[in-house]
Every structure is written in structure tokens, then in C-alpha cells.
Image: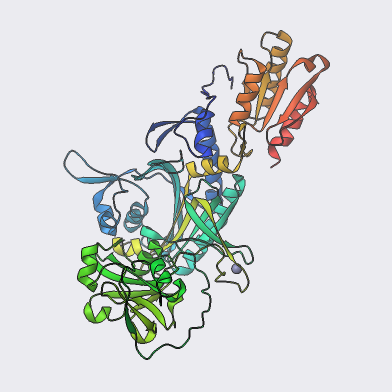
Amino acid sequence: MRWSRYFIPTLREDPADAEVVSHKLLLRAGLIRQLAAGIYSFLPLGQRVAQKVMQILREEMNAIGGQELFLPALHPAEIWQESGRWSAIGDEMFRLKDRKGTDMCLGMTHEEIIASIARNDIRSYKQLPQVWYQMQMKFRDEARPKSGLIRVRSFIMKDAYSLDVDRAGLDKSFLDQRQAYKNIFTRCGLQFLIVEASSGSMGGTESNEFIAASPAGEDLIVSCANCGYAANLEKATSRPEEIADEPGPDAPEEFPTPGVRTIDDLIKFPGGADANRQIKSLVFFATIDGESRPVLVLLRGDHQLHETKLSDNLRATAVRPAHPEEIRDLLGASAGSLGGVGAKQRTPSLRIVADSALKNRRNMTTGANKDDHHFRGVDIARDISVDEWFDLRTVESGERCPRCETGTLEVFKGMEIGHIFKLGTKYSESMGATVLTQDGKEVPIVMGSYGIGVERIISAAVEQQHDDDGIIWPKSLAPFDVVVTITNMKQDELRQAGEKLYEELQRAGLDVLLDDREERAGVKFKDADLIGIPYRVTIGKKVADGMVELFDRRAKKSEDVRIGEVVATMAALSTDT
Ligand SMILES: [Zn+2]
């Protein structure tokens, strides 16, 4: 490819609206352009990188027996109604009507389509297992698209689905995918870790997220350096510290607390209590089986609720904090004076759930469901009718690891680059995708679902590998293996040497960009650094002595190489990872 004719609109300055590094650099290096919020075009250079990513995805999916297919992006609502997700998924789904008024949507994922193919054409266990995958545009109506290609409304996804006759089959398919994903991200040159995650609206029993550590990431990840425990914050837990409570009175004692509204107020209040001796009481409404139900959530005073944990544990499709008038209706007081003591007696329909760190605590302080009054001496087991104990609190850095004895947890930012799910029979049961087993029994197909965002891989690669001069592509994703830079197009000797090398390198099977623009050498070097091609061969004055300069973008080092040895040197460098 000749740079003089190739479309690489590089920018000198950082675009004003770009905040994260990958967004800035992908725009500046001329890989992408924005069409609308969260909608991007891949320009030729960006498309080359995307193609390299997709080739790696294809090879690794094929290696575990994946069969590539291609499913439509436009779906009838009917099929999403069958699985129940038409109503379970909120505004993030793009919905539209066709000319006949029929509800349609743009696919966010394809479990329903896969289950519908399976129910029509798979009858017997003999046809299983199947592993199907595709690369397809997906659509998500993000409330706040941002960070370039990290949070977008339309994107390319590699999604794969496994169909098995039983759980053991699913376990194997899941492990195959997990290994393939490790290979993919390793080949893409990414630093990543595998974490336990919430399955959210996908459903199922188990899920693993692949996370690239990056300050641009929107996920919070918890890990223990001692034992390797790693989980998304929405799933992570910690070992609660053991607190020895003094024995309290025989029954809770009510006391006036004028003006006390918060945990902090009560710490400072004379006769109050430290945060870890208080019970925090929060009222939520959870949508469960299409019905909105009140829930009283109890946590230790110094702990924060994680709403995803609440919604996952309640198996709710949505949770929201109750409004002040709803709270008064349920408990007879305002937020700030609420508590679990007597709450069930007052409102039997109220479900009380408590965080496990409160278990066996006594002599605690909490609101009395009477404005400006609290109870002290509360023994949770004795005084509060807790319906269920869950892990609901948000883990913080420095807490103790739940898995090993000595490790402490660290919380950091990361970017989700892949997510794999054991779906089980959620879709096959609701949609009637069954097979006959060897014994002639009809059973639902056991499914798994496995996704990777192509744009996320590209963003993560740039986030993790760049410097002040621009992108440093891993060799596997680089749009070209090498750029041949002719420093002065006016000198015939240089031009001819460059053209010749360009031909030879191409013949050796390398992706070569020839910088044959009528520009100063400094401009050419700057552009080459910005777009991040791993090697640059500089054709300059030393050509007279039969030498060129080979520049390594990552190491930022150059060495003189004999012209006759460039092809062999480059061939060796580009295959070595
Ligand atoms: Zn640990």
C-alpha cells in the first residue's frame, strides 16, 4: 500500500471531546470517525486492525470445533417475547415497527435465534454437541455512549453458542471456550484476567468475565494478589471482620435522637454508636415476576449496598429506592429513623433481607420507625425477622480475601473484553428446544453463550500499549507489519531503493506500507509513530553505503541494517511474538 494514495487522515491535536487515551489516539491516527453518539465508522486503517482481530477470533473458534454462521440483526419481537426478554430488557434495546405495525428489534445478542434454529432442526442427542459462532453487528441503546469505542451503540461482536445434551457437556463446552478466549486475548497482546461476574439479564448459573486492566475501564474489579481470587465488584465478596459484641439488654431500648438523619449523625450523637455498631436500613422496590414488591435491606452502618447484588439475589429484573412517601407508608417514619425492629409486624408484605456481615450481631443501634427515635441494644437474631441473608455489601480495598486466610483485596478499574455464560436451559425451556436422549427421554438442550466485542479488544490494546507519540500495536493487530519511509522523494536513489524494498518485502508475504508522500522526513516519522506500525525501515543518506535504518516502534531504538538483509530480518521479526 502506498501512503500517498491511502486514506489515513491523521490529526496533529487531540480532539476536544475525547477523554480516554484510546479514543484520542484512534481518532488522531485516522482509524475511526464518529457518525453520531456511540456510532463510529472504521476507516481503512481501522478496518485492517478489525480484520486482524476477527481473523484471530475465527481461528480460535474453529480450533475448538466452532462453525461460523451468520444471523440476522433485525428480529421480530415475537421471539424475544417467547423467552421473556422483550419485557425483561429495558430501554437499552432498540425497538421499531415494520410497515405493518409489527414490533421488531435490533439484536443485542442472539440466544433466541439460536434456540429457534435448534428447536426446528435438532431432534436427537446424536446431533449434539454443536458450537456455532458469528461476527455480527449488535445494537445497544446506551444512555450515555462515551469513551470512543468503549461504550457504543452499535458494535461488532463475535458471539458463540454451545448446545449440549446435558450439564457435563456444557461444562466441557464452557471450558473449551474459556481456553479459546485465553488464547485469543494472549494472541492480541492484552494483559487480562478472568473474573467471576454477575449474569445479569442473560440468566444462567455461572459466568466469567475477561477483563483488561485499564483506567479507562468502567468495571470495578476486586482481586487478591495472595491467592488469585478475582471478581467483578458486583459479584465480589470479602471475609467480614469478626466483632465481639458486648451482651446487651433483654430487649431493645428506644431513645430520642432529635435531628439524627445519617449514620454519621448517630456516631456524633451523645449516646450514639460507631458505624460498625449501627444497622443501616434502606427501602427498595424490586420488580419480581413482573410485580413491584417492597424490600427492607439491612447492612452494617459502615457498609455500602451494591444494587446489582441486591437485584441478582432477589432475582429481580429491576430494583429502585423507594420514594419518601412510600417509605412513610410502609414504616411510618422518614429515612434516617428506619429500622427492622417491628417492621414485619407493621407491614407483613415487607420482605426483609440482610447482609451477611450482620449475622449474629447484638447490642446494635438502629432506627425505631418513629421520627427522631432509635433503638439501642438490638439483637438481630432476637429482634428482627430477617427473611433472607445475602451478600449485599460493596467490597472495598483493604478488606480480607474471602478465599484465603491472609490475603487482602484490592479494587481497580478494568474493561470487559469478553464474557462467557453457562446459560443452562433458560432459553431452551421457554422456547421449547428439546432433544431425545439415548433412553428416548425428551430433555431441554443445555446452552452456553460466549461473547467478545471486537471494538473492546482494539480499545484495550491501545489503552494498554501507547506512549506520548501514539499507538504501539502488538504485532498481531498492527495494520501493517512494516512501513518503508523514503526520507526525500526528490532523490531518485532513495526513491528507487524504497520502491525496490517495498516490492521485496511484499513478496516475502509482509503487509507493507510505503511512505512515498512528498513530505518532510520529520512529518513522516511522526505519522508512523502515531499510527503505531511495529517497524519502520528508513531509506536515507546511508543508502549510498548500502545501509538503511531499522526502527523498532516499541523499543524506540534503531539500528543500521544492510539493504540486502532487510527482508530476512523483517521476516524473522514479524513472526517472532
Ligand atoms: Zn486470597
Quick check: 182 above or below 464? below
Q: Residue furthest front?
A: 270
Q: Residue furthest left?
A: 100
Instruction: Find residue 397 and report its image quarter.
Output: bottom right
Quick check: 398 above or below 54? below
Say whether residue 270 is left or right of residue 20.
left
Front residue of 415 and 548: 415
Instruction: Find residue 437 and report its image quarter.
Output: bottom left
Front residue of 162 and 511: 511
Front residue of 143 and 433: 143
Viewer can see residue 435 = no
Q: Residue 107 appears at what percent x and percent y? A: 34, 46
Quick check: 435 above or below 494? below
Q: Residue 528 appears at what percent x and percent y? A: 62, 26
Q: Quadrant of ligand 1?
A: bottom right
Q: Residue 393 appears at what percent x and percent y? A: 44, 67
